Image (tube, rainbow, N blue to C red):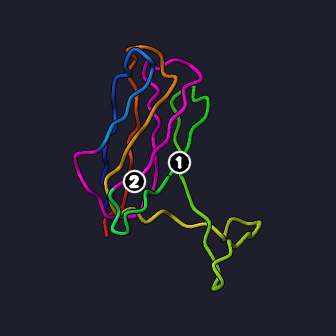
Amino acid sequence: MSIRSIELEGTTDGSGDVTVNSTLRISGYLERVDWVDGDLADGNDAVISVQGTPSGVAQTLMTLTNANADAVYYPRTLMQGETGADLTGSAGGDRTRYLVIGVPRLVVSSGGATKTGGCILYYEPV
């Protein structure tokens, strides 16, 4: 297994917002997200997504609400059965890593004026 990483870091504008698009397109399984709060204001909100997918449908990987400190996350998504309905096992066997194909994006709101922070995405290429 060869893990790679992409850093998405930016400085907010006067309204406390920033959008950071990766300069690289990736193809792989998302393993981990390190949230690096930097000096962003407490209570900031962030959405980590993938744009420019082969289908054209953007994919949200993680939404953080009221993020106040550095953290490590292992985001997973629900699997579906043959009818398309979400599986809902209680032991976590109904979840899998995200398959990410496209351009990672970070959007931060309420981060405070001219504050810096972001995330690091760790993924296994396919």
Q: Amino acid at mark 2?
A: Val
Instruction: Pick whichever of labels 1 and 2 is earlier in the sequence.
Output: 2
* Residue 105 vertical placement versus 67 (above, below): below
Please give the label number shown on residue 25.
none
Q: Is residue 102 left or right of residue 15?
A: left
In the foreground, 37 or 15: 15
Residue sitting at 60 percent across and 72 percent down? 79
Magenta segment, principal secondary structure? Answer: strand
In the rendered image, residue 117 lying in the magenta stretch gets the answer: no
Residue 96 x/y as whole percent: 55, 67
Q: CA distance from mark 1 to mark 2?
A: 10 Å
Q: Which residues are magenta?
A: 22-51
Please give the label number shown on residue 50.
2
Q: Quadrant of residue 42?
A: top right
Element type at mark 1: strand
The residue sitting at the left extreme is 23
The residue sitting at the right extreme is 90
Residue sitting at 56 percent across and 59 percent down? 76
Q: Amino acid at mark 1?
A: Met
Q: Residues within 10 Å of mark 1 (few under 14, many from 20)?
A: some
The residue sitting at the front extreme is 56
* Residue 69 vertical placement versus 107 (above, below): above
* Residue 34 vertical placement versus 75 (above, below): above
Residue sitting at 37 percent across and 34 percent down? 19
Please give the label number shown on residue 62.
1
In the rendered image, residue 37 lying in the magenta stretch gets the answer: yes
Q: Is residue 72 left or right of residue 19?
A: right
Quadrant, the C terminus: bottom left
Quadrant, the N terminus: bottom left
